Amino acid sequence: MTDQTDRSPRLPYLSEKLLEGFSITTQQIVEGIEQAFAGQRRGSAWTAPKAVITPGDDRYIMATLAVSDDPPVVATKSLVLNPRNPKRGLAAINSIVTLLDSETGLPLAVIDGNWVTAWRTAGLSAVAAKRLARRDAAVMAFIGCGVQAQSHLAIFQDLFPLREIHAFGRGTANRDALCRAAEARGLTAVRSKTAKEAIGDADIVVSSVTLLPSPEPFLDAQWLKSGCLAVMTDMAAPWFADSLSAFQRIVIDDLEQETKMSKPMVDPSLVAGDLFGLLGGDLPGRENQQQRIAFIFRGLALGDLALAGLAWRHAKATGAIPS
């Protein structure tokens, strides 16, 4: 029998369809992430290193936690990556973000985590690229052509005078979909036959290769031209480790988080600093047009917090969630 005394309202769910309808802009995403970093620097936002469980059967299970006083929210993301999902007709990655009021602890909403992951990752890349890429970057290459490639294409076209993309991936369906998206945006799209061909002439390279099962390295940083920025959302897993010394500078997302991970993404001696230092002015941005630079990152709870908070504010402002 249903307990009729429980009259509490249902917790709002912000679906991907609803979130896309908000038409959140690149500027809002970038500024939201930058404000979250500023909040942590001044002591009004806090994050914990991501927690990861790998059961040993190719699943990757992860959680992030971040807290802010403005907006006053706690954002917790739970994510499961399972490479067997596509055979079930499901996305390889599925996740949710739960929001609590950071003052009272009362639940506020549940948010589609795949939307948050896609746009916070591209947003973190964009925040770094604003400072590390050449401003005249016109050719962008994608190694891996899935969700992350699509979100990076959308954001980076708003930031740089792109005219052409090169696409290389393991499957043709995602590659062709990315090329069609680029062409619909007025860009020339090249379906590259090899990874080397894709990245050799690019001003910006984004690698977003699926981490499970663990990829064998096949990318060489020495293929990149002078002045290129390589953004590695895949923790540099598909790049030959001994080629990374070809970069004049390597920046990661969070030095503190990296010290708590069981295996470093890259030889620590090659790392110049992190995104906190870059945004805070402790680490300079690009210093000349010839520098070959890499931004390598695991992903930050602070990014999830920024996007979840942005979604929450839009939901309140549009009436999707009653005030």
Image (cartoon, grey):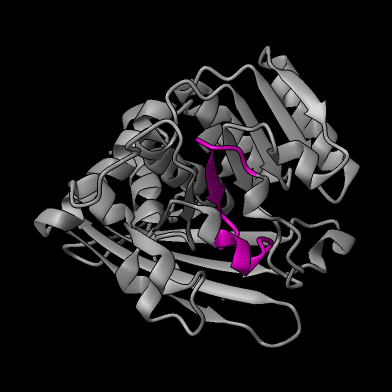
* Residue occupying the point 50% across, 52% down: 247
* Residue occupying the point 88% across, 48% down: 171
Is residue 303 in the magenta section? no
Residue 232: percent from left, percent from top: 56, 53
Q: Is residue 195 left or right of residue 279?
A: right
Q: From the viewer's perspective, is residue 319 above or below residue 104?
A: above
**Residue 184 picture quarter:** top right
Residue 172: percent from left, percent from top: 89, 41
Q: From the viewer's perspective, is residue 129 above or below residue 57?
A: above
Instruction: Determine the main secondary structure of the stretch shown in magenta.
Output: loop
Identify the magenta region.
224-244
Between 230 and 124, the residue placed more toward the observer is 230
Residue 234: percent from left, percent from top: 60, 59
Q: Is residue 69 in view?
A: no
Q: Is residue 244 left or right of residue 77?
A: right
Residue 99: percent from left, percent from top: 36, 58
Q: From the viewer's perspective, is residue 20 above or below residue 57?
A: above
The quadrant of the picture occupied by the C terminus is top left
* Residue occupying the point 86% across, 63% down: 88
